[in-house]
Amino acid sequence: MPPVLEPNDIYSETRPDKLSPAVRGFPSRLYVPNGISNTVDVIDPNTYQIIASFPADEEPQHVVPSYDLTKLWVLNNQGDSLTPIDPSTGKNGETVHVDDPYNLYYTPDGKYALVVAERLRRLDFRDPQTMHLRYSLAVPCRGVNHLDYSLNGRYLIASCEFSNELIKIDVAERKILGRLPLPRRRGQPQDVRLSPDGKVFYVADMRAHGVYLINGESFTVLDFLPTGKGAHGLNVSRDSKVLYVSNRGEGSISVIDFATRKVVNKWRFPGGGSPDMGGLSVDGKVLWLGGRYHHEVYAIDTTTGQLLARIKVAKGPHGVCIYPQPGRYSLGHTGNFR
């Protein structure tokens, strides 16, 4: 794994002035996978206009930057395939067969692409360039979907939405280290994100309507923060001070302060909405999220919390990716960079 340059802030290399040379020539674009329409819409974030659209295989779920930052992958979950996008042109390439790609991450050393095969209940370690399968790890839970890595990259913690638990996995040894049932009944854990200091994993739970704080070393629950109905996606601010939580069931964003581990603000969308997954603009001033059930994309001002735009797209927008973004390498999902 590339060395951690600031142990107290693992996101120090995702500041606005930290664009990698690999992405500096890429135009800023928003890539929107529409899981019901089976298309990808491409939006110019400066004009809020759809400038292109192309067909995808069945049920595209997320758009994920490659570890080396040079490519984007559209994850066609039910189509059992990945569609590459060249971010220098915004054009799609030839589809690659991959079993059940609900989500996609990369091991911190970049050696493997880690396909989260939700319905098959496994994590597939694949070649990050060819996507050929190298190893497969069966997981002892239902609905594995999102994950993040420890400070040293040695282990990961993944959420299992249909069995209301978390699992801890040794990345190098590819073995299960533990299972953690979550205490609130009928929970449905979703996105996972490590705190800047590497001490706490934040886990959104869309049926418990809040965020768990997890000690990764002892693998125990530290706290639970109510945020709003349908807590779902997590994004870290460009200055690493706050965490944005999208509450998909009520059309709001909660803001958690990392220093105090408390909810310090809440931004409600006029007229409601269904904010899901997404990412931040390079300067961190705009948070972009898909509106899962409203066929739209949201632009939110991170200074004021104002909803800047609702952009109508095709049906079922899910894991939206704004690209390029700062960082040395991508750990996957719609934009987890370090």
Image: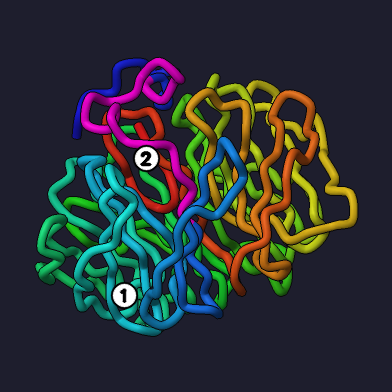
In this figure, which residue is indicated by the disc labeled 1? 122
Dot 2 amino acid type = Ser
Q: Which mark is residue 150?
A: 2
Where is 331 relative to 207, above or below?
A: above
Q: Can you give x and y, in whole percent of width and height, for residue 181 in the image? A: 57, 66
State the residue in front, 289 or 134.
Answer: 289
Mark 1: amino acid: Arg
Q: Magenta span covers which residues?
A: 13-31
- Nearest the camera: 141 or 85? 85
Q: Secondary structure at mark 1?
A: strand
55 or 215: which is nearer to us? 55
- The label shown at residue 86 is none
Q: Quadrant of the C terminus?
A: top left
Mark 1 crowd level (few <14, some 14–19, many ≥20, 10 Å Cα): many
Identify the secondary structure beneath mark 2: loop
Residue 149, x across and y down, in percent: 36, 44
